[in-house]
Amino acid sequence: MNLEIVTIGDELLLGFTIDTNAAHLAREFAALGVRIVRRTTCGDDADAIRDAVQQALDRTGAVITTGGLGPTADDQTKPAIASIFGRGMVMDETILANLEARWLKRFGHALPDSNRQQALVPEGCTILENRHGSAPGIWLEDARGRWVAMLPGVPREMRGMVADTMLPRLRDRLPQHGPVVRARTLRTANIAESALADRLGELARGVDGLSLAYLPGNDGVDLRLTSYNKPAMDTERALRAAADKVREKVGRFVYGEGDDDLAALMLADAGARGDTMAVAESCTGGLLGMRLTAVPGSSRVFLGGTIAYANEVKTRELGVDAAVIESQGAVSEAVARAMATGARLRFGSTIGMGITGIAGPDGGSAEKPVGTVWVAVDLRGEVRAVRAILPGDRSEIRWRASQLALDRLRKLYARDEDATGWTARGN
Amino acid sequence: MNLEIVTIGDELLLGFTIDTNAAHLAREFAALGVRIVRRTTCGDDADAIRDAVQQALDRTGAVITTGGLGPTADDQTKPAIASIFGRGMVMDETILANLEARWLKRFGHALPDSNRQQALVPEGCTILENRHGSAPGIWLEDARGRWVAMLPGVPREMRGMVADTMLPRLRDRLPQHGPVVRARTLRTANIAESALADRLGELARGVDGLSLAYLPGNDGVDLRLTSYNKPAMDTERALRAAADKVREKVGRFVYGEGDDDLAALMLADAGARGDTMAVAESCTGGLLGMRLTAVPGSSRVFLGGTIAYANEVKTRELGVDAAVIESQGAVSEAVARAMATGARLRFGSTIGMGITGIAGPDGGSAEKPVGTVWVAVDLRGEVRAVRAILPGDRSEIRWRASQLALDRLRKLYARDEDATGWTARGN
C-alpha cells in the first residue's frame, strides 16, 4: 500500500513550527508495511489544500492529512477536502453536543454561534474518535475505495489517534504477508564510527541483506539495522539474527537498544547490586545529576552530589588536595579520582563519579585542548579513571562527558578494563 | 516572489530523520519577503524527484531542493533535475580537482573511479560554493528565468549556503519595497496564557494590525508579534512600536526577547552587580546548575552547588533542620528557604537558590500534588520564596522549576514583590 501525507498549516510554511508529525507517521506506517511515497505541506488556504490533497489522492488513492481541524476561523480543511469528494457539509449532532458540554464546563456559558461550525463534517464521513483532544478526526472514502483521513495537528493528539484508530484500520486493509520496513538499533558509547566499522569487518556495510547505518550522536554511535522487504515475521527473525552477529563483533561497546538511556540503565544495574550513587561535577555543572534524577524512582539509588565548579569548592567540599590541583591542573587524572572518592565518602554512597574537563569555547591549551575530559568512578574504593578528548561544542562535550562517566561505570561492572574513551578530536 | 521547497531523501520519508531544514529555510525567506507556498518531500528516486520538482517549477518558477547531493551511489538528484531543463551532465574540472585533493589528503590514495561522478554537474549550471562541506550546490536556470537551486541536506552545510549564497542572490531579484514577513518575540515566565490575555485587554488579539500569538513552552509563554504585509523598513518600526505597547501592559513578566535564555541573563545581571551564585537542588537534581554552567564564562559568577536529593543530604550538607523536614515535609517553604541560605553560606556566594518539589510521576498527595514546587532565593541574607503547582510531566516540571527560581531572582533584583508563580495545574 502506498500512501501520501499532507500536512496543513501556515505555521509550518512560515517555519515557526518544525514538523515532527510527518516523521512519526512515517515510522509507524513503514513498520506496518505502508510506504509513504510523498509528503506535501501547504498553508491554511482552501485552494491550496484542495489542490495538494487532490493530487496526492490521484497518485495513491490513500492520503492522511494533519492539521487544520482546530477551532480557529481559518479552518478550511474539512470543506476543502469534502469538495474533492463532491460532498457538502452537515452538522454532526454528537460532536455538537460534546462541544456544548465542553464550553459549559470550561467557560460557564453556552457555545457561541461562531463556534458551531466546528461540528460541521463532510456528508457520509466516518468520525474518528479523539480521546486526546477536542477535535475529532474525519475519514472520507469514495465508492472506489479511495480515502482521506484528516487528523489533528497537535502532536500528542495526532499520535494518540494514529495508535487508536489509524493503525488498526490500515492493518485490516493490508495483505497478510506483505513486506514491511522495520529497524533495530544497537546503541554504542565511546567508540568512533570508523573503529566500529573496523571491528565489524565484513559486516560493516550490512548483515545478511539488512542495511547497517552508523548514526553518531551525543550518546555515542547508534547502529541501525533496517529490513526493507521481508514479511513481518521474517523481519523480526532477520533483525534478531543480524543484531546477534553485530553484538558478537562489537557487543562490549553496546550499552542498550532502541531508546535506552545509559543513565537509566546504570541506575537499574546499581540498584540491582545494592549500590548507591553520588556525583562530583566540574565542567558538567550538574548535568550528570540531572540525567540520573530525570529517571523516575532514581531516589532509591542516587543520593546527591556536589557541583564543584570553582577549584576552592573541589578542595573544601570534596577534599581534593589544592597542591595537586596546582601541580597537575584541575583537569587531571588525580583530580578526577579525588573527586570521585570525595563524592562517595561525603554522601556515604557505594559509588562516586567525578568529572572534570574543559568544555570550551575558552580555556583550552596545546597540551589540554578544549574537549579534554577526565572522568573517574569509585566503586566501593576501587577507582578507575579515563581520559578523552571529546568532539563538539560546549553542550556536546558536556553531554558526552556525562556519557563517558556512565559508560565507565558500565565497564567497571562488566570487568571490561579496556576503557579507551575518545582519544582524538572528531574520532 | 513565490517559492517551493522540495526536500529529498528516503530517510525523511521513512521517518528516520526529522526535517529541520524546511523550517529554517522558511523563516529565512519569509523574513526577506519570499513566500514559500508549498513544500514537498520525496525519496531518492529519479522519477519521484523529477516529478516533484517539475510540478513545483510549473507552479512557481522558483524551487529550492535540499538533499540528494551526497557521495553515495543512490545520488539521483542532479541528473533528474538536469533532465527537466533538457540538460545533460558534464564533468566539472574544478570540483574534480577539489575532490582528488581531498581524497589524497584524507585517505592517502587517489579518487576511486566510482566517486568521480560527484564532479558531474548539469550543463550550463552555476556552481554554488559550499564552504561548510564537500558537495557544492547547483543553480540551474532557463531562458525564461525559472530556476532550481540544489543545496546539500546536511543542516549545517545547508544553513551556511543559504546565508552565503542564496539570500544575496534572492535579494537581488526582489523588488526594493515588497512586503516581508517578520516576527518579534517577547519571552514571559511564570504567568499563564489566560492571565497575559486578561492583562493585555484590547491588545490580546493583535497590536496595530500585527498578529499576536501565544506560544506556551517550558520557559514560559512567548508572545510573538508578526508582521505579514509591510515593506522591510516599516516592518521593523511597526514591530518595535507594538513590542513597546505589549511591554507597557505585561512588561514585568517579560524577561527577554527572541532566543534569550533566563539563566544567561541572570548570570549577566549577577555579574554586573558583583554577585556570585550557588545552588541547592532537590527535585531538579542538578538541572539548574547545568543550565547556569551551560553558559560560557559562567565560572566568573557561579561557584557550585549541592544536589540534595536525599533528605539526610539536605540536613547534613545544607543545614536544613531535620525536625522541620519531619514536621513540614521536604517540599515546604521552610525547607526551600533553608536550602537557599545553606547553599549561600556553604559556597560563600552572595546568592543562594534552593529548589524542592514533587516532579512525579509518583510522590504526590491531595495536599501536595505532583508539580508542587517551592523555590527560594537568598540574596545577601534577604530571602524570598515562592510556591507553584507546575503543569506537565516530570521533565517539564523540573525545567519549569529551574525557570521559577531564576525568575524569582529576576524579580528580587527588580524589586517586584508580586511573585505569584503558577498556582493551579494547567494554568
Image: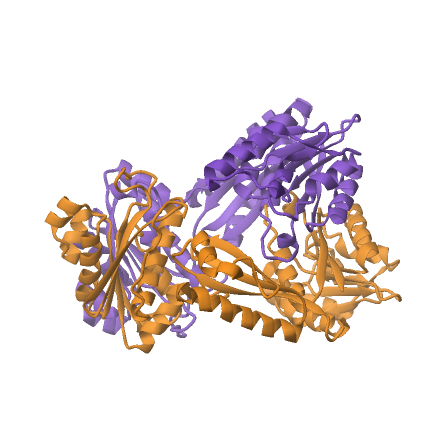
Chain colours: A orange, B purple
Please provide percent x and percent y for residue B363: 38, 73
Residue in the foreground of this view, choosing between A399 and B89: B89
Left or right: residue A166 versus residue B96 is: right
Please provide percent x and percent y for residue B1: 71, 31
Left or right: residue B222 versus residue B181 is: left
Image mark count: 0
Q: Which residue sits furthest left?
A: A323
Judge whether residue A15 can be spotted in this image.
no
Judge whether residue A64 can be spotted in this image.
yes
Q: Compared to A234, does B203 lie above or below?
A: above
- Residue B260 placement: quadrant: top left
Residue drawn where x is 60% and y is 26% of the image: B168
Residue in the foreground of this view, choosing between A242 and A300: A242
Please provide percent x and percent y for residue A97: 72, 69
Q: Compared to B168, does A47 lie above or below?
A: below
Please provide percent x and percent y for residue B229: 67, 33
- Residue A265 placement: quadrant: bottom left
